[in-house]
Image (tube, grey):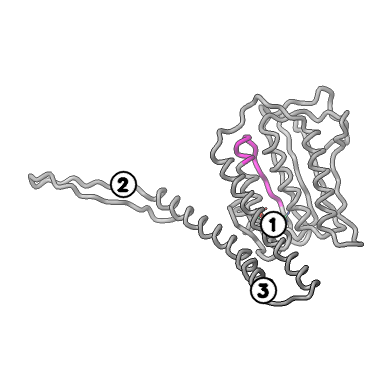
């Protein structure tokens, strides 16, 4: 634990007596330190791609280049610009989440619809991440065809969608193509339900688990950046889940893979009109 920090002031009354005022500024200082870290991190994350961009612009302006080389430079510039764009989008998403009241229980979204959108996105992303001629991931989803009722969740559909997508994108980005990613939706007897994503990636050592949702926390920096990571994905997931009263649980075994599970409380859920088919979970 960190030591307590006090700000102390002494006020003389003029008659020899003095008033000693001590204010506990521990939390204030911690918040300040976090803010400074955050600004330093953001600056660093932007500076790296920007340096690359500036370098390439200079090269293009000064050196006579073959058409092929020119195209290669432009492709790298496009990549670095996209990286900055993702970072800015994630930063804006975070600040929007922090600045708005949590969604109430008025807007209900069918779980099947969310899962269908996730599935389409996951299959597209897997193809994009897979090298030509290699097999994409084996992706398994519960049956969420339009006629299948998996119940409804209360909250902001776009936020929930982005939280689920972030978990899926991580599973796909950290799992080699050809291996399996399994998505499950499991309803529990007490009315709560769990969305989970299981992967066959490298797994995460237990010492890292508690810090995964911190902004810019990465287990492996270069791997995260290579696959287009901003380091903000799980921070966004955490915010969205908090706002929906949901909890995130991570189980991981190094060498065999990870399971990220999101559990929603009963009051956020409406059960399906008909009992879910046996293979839905
Ligand atoms: P990033 O953009 O770096 O992926 P995230 O906030 O989404 O940022 O994740 C934080 C870190 O957690 C990642 O850098 C990675 O080290 C680790 N991580 C997240 N998901 C997985 C996963 N499915 N398998 C292995 N490591 C993961």
Disc number placed over residue 59 in the picture, else none:
3
Instruction: Give the residue at mark 2.
Output: 23
| Label 2 vs label 1, nearer the camera | 1
Instruction: Give SS at disc 1.
Output: helix
Q: Is mark 3 within 8 Å of ligand 1?
A: no
Q: Residue furthest left?
A: 15
Q: In the image, residue 29 lies at what x, y percent?
A: 40, 52
Instruction: Give the residue at mark 1.
Output: 82
Tell me which numbered mark, 1 or 3, is placed earlier along the sequence.
3
| Label 1 vs label 3, nearer the camera | 3
Front residue of this view, candidates 209 and 132: 132
| Residue numbers of the magenta segment | 240-251
Instruction: Give SS at disc 3.
Output: helix
As measured in the structure, the alpha-carbon distance from the residue carrying label 2 to the one carrying label 1 is 46 Å
Asked where in the image residue 57 lies, by quadrant, the reply is bottom right
Q: Residues within 10 Å of mark 1 (few under 14, many from 20)?
A: some
As measured in the structure, the alpha-carbon distance from the residue carrying label 1 to the one carrying label 3 is 20 Å
Residue drawn at (68%, 62%), measured in percent from left and top? 80
Q: In the image, residue 68 lies at what x, y percent?
A: 81, 72
Front residue of this view, candidates 69 and 34: 69
CB-based contact (under 8 Å), mark 2 and mark 1: no
Q: Is mark 2 within 8 Å of ligand 1?
A: no
Q: Is mark 1 within 8 Å of ligand 1?
A: no
Residue drawn at (59%, 54%), measured in percent from left and top? 211
Q: Quadrant of the C terminus?
A: top right
Q: Residues within 10 Å of mark 2 (few under 14, many from 20)?
A: few
Vertical placement of 269 versus 79: above or below? above
Residue drawn at (82%, 60%), measured in percent from left and top? 176
């Amino acid at each position: 634990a960190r030591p307590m920090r006090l700000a102390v002031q002494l006020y003389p009354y003029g008659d020899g007596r003095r008033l000693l005022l001590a204010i506990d500024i521990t939390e204030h200082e911690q918040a300040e330190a976090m803010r400074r870290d955050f600004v330093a991190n953001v600056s660093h994350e932007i500076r790296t791609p920007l340096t690359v961009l500036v370098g390439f612009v200079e090269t293009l302006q000064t050196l006579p280049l073959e058409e092929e080389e020119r195209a290669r430079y432009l492709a790298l510039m496009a990549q670095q610009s996209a990286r900055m764009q993702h970072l800015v989008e994630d930063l804006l998403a975070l600040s929007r989440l922090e600045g708005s009241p949590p969604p109430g229980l008025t807007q209900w979204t069918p779980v099947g619809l969310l899962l269908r959108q996730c599935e389409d996105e996951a299959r597209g992303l897997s193809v994009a991440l897979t090298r030509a001629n290699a097999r994409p991931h084996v992706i398994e989803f519960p049956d969420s065809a339009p006629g299948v009722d998996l119940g409804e969740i209360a909250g902001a559909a776009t936020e929930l969608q982005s939280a689920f997508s972030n978990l899926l994108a991580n599973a796909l980005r950290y799992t080699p193509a050809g291996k399996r990613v399994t998505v499950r939706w499991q309803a529990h007897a007490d009315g709560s339900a769990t969305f989970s994503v299981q992967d066959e990636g490298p797994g995460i050592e237990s010492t890292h688990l508690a810090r995964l949702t911190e902004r810019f926390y990465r287990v492996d920096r270069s791997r995260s950046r290579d696959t287009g990571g901003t380091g903000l994905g799980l921070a966004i997931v955490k915010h969205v889940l908090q706002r929906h009263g949901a909890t995130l649980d991570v189980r991981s075994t190094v060498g065999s893979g990870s399971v990220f599970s999101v559990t929603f409380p009963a009051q956020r859920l409406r059960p399906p009109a008909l009992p879910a088919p046996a293979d839905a979970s």
